[in-house]
Image: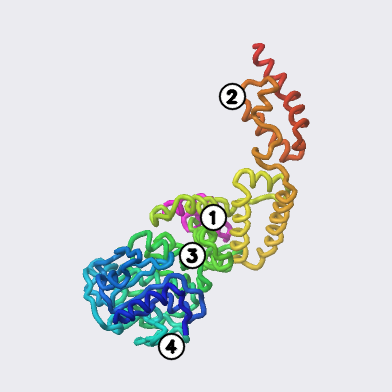
Amino acid sequence: MIKLPSQVKTAISKLAENGFEAYIVGGCVRDSLLGMEAHDYDITTSAQPEEVKKVFIGYRVIETGIKHGTVTVIINKMPLEITTFRIDSDYCDNRHPENVTFTKSLKEDTARRDFTMNAIAYSDETGVCDYYNGTNDLNNKIIRCVGDADKRFNEDALRIMRALRFSSTLGFDIEQSTKAAIFKNKELLKNISSERIASEFVKLLCGKNVKNVLLEYAGVISVIIPEITPMIGFDQKNIHHIYDVYTHTVTAVDNIENEPVLRMAAFFHDIGKPRCFFEKDGQGHFYGHAQVGAEMTSHILRRLKFDNAARETVVKLVKLHDVQIEQTETAVKRCMNRHSPEIFFMLLKIKRADTKAQSPICFSRLEYLDGLEKTADKILNSKECFSLKQLEVNGSDIISLGISPGRQIGVILNRLLDEIIKSSLTNEKQVLLEYIKENFLTENNNMHDK
């Protein structure tokens, strides 16, 4: 038995009291049966939209997609999408049906859904209603289209990405006829909006089974990101690498925590390598690949309509992933000053994932990265100065010494910070003021004399 929120029980009960069938359906049933927390509860019913509106007089009702039989009812602050049993007509754009026909049959309604595991309905009164053996597929960890897979993907090509996403996030295998239809219809993904593709792709990247999916379905991913095609099978011809560029990339993705920006940065970090490859003395080299990769990544993420903040962070991490940082406090402070502590720690995670995807002869670098992290932690915990905002003096203090406002103020502040980072000065107000007097005040006065 699935435990339903009180708002969902209320909605189903009110529909039933008025003589209509009503069930939860789709992802909320799937997740509940898997023992996962369900989030959005979708309700399917034999009541037509106008009938639903009458049942819920007194509640806030939003005509979300009334043409396709969907209204949203707000019950105790919970929005519930309630959709009439329907049969979809032909899909004109590989995404949406031209029109729908309402039906009184739950079986006909669930026949239009994408995968068997998403075609299971449930109510407390009837229990599980499963016309397409979705529970068996859940138990066997199989993703299978409802009915003809070829037809399902032609109806809505985004289902291709959803299949890959579910395989990645749930760790399920894709059934053979469904897999064959994915490869047969992959080019239809070009008809889907960039925003929808990007949303599914990020969820895929953050799945626990991401490595297997990215390797097995590289030919599908290359439809939405054709720039990865040269990476696939590209021999690096380098003693530091045991994988081709694409397999190395996928292994790096698998070795970093499943946070969207980090997974994306790992996915794109070596995308510039094939363009920069040259061979010398039997070894492959990729000078400049980080910069080239950053430019390519920026272009790809713009095309996929990613938000600016995510794009800029991913691009920065790709650009910096190959930068060498000395294991000294001065070097770490400079890096955190230039890029922020947040970027610094993200960069270390990218470098670790990158290293773990290389030859075992490189694994000693992990100790070096651990050392950088410890140094950064010490700096932060000790509240040591590495940025202008941490200085114990400001522009007003400098002006009070008799130095005129202007560009010179910034020069002095940056000089102070540089000396502190080098440990030549301590970040104490009086010490800094004395340094300014000795090194800038005389120079400033001389300039006025001239």
On the image, the x and y values in percent for residue 11 come to 37, 74
| Magenta-colored stretch includes residue 151 | no
Q: Which residue is mark 4?
A: 136
**Secondary structure beneath label 4:** helix
Of the numbered discs 4 and 2, the one sitting upstream in the chain is 4
**Secondary structure beneath label 2:** loop
Of the numbered discs 1 and 3, the one sitting upstream in the chain is 3
Magenta stretch in the rendered image: 273-299
**Which residue is at a point 69% across and 20% down the rendered structure image?**
443
Q: State which quadrant residue 108 falls in.
A: bottom left
- Amino acid residing under circle 1: Phe
Nearer the observer, 393 or 355: 393
Q: Which residue is mark 1?
A: 286
Q: Which residue is mark 2?
A: 406
Query: Which mark is nearer the camera, 3 or 2?
Result: 2
Crowd class of label 2 (few under 14; some 14 to 19; many from 20; radius 10 Å): few
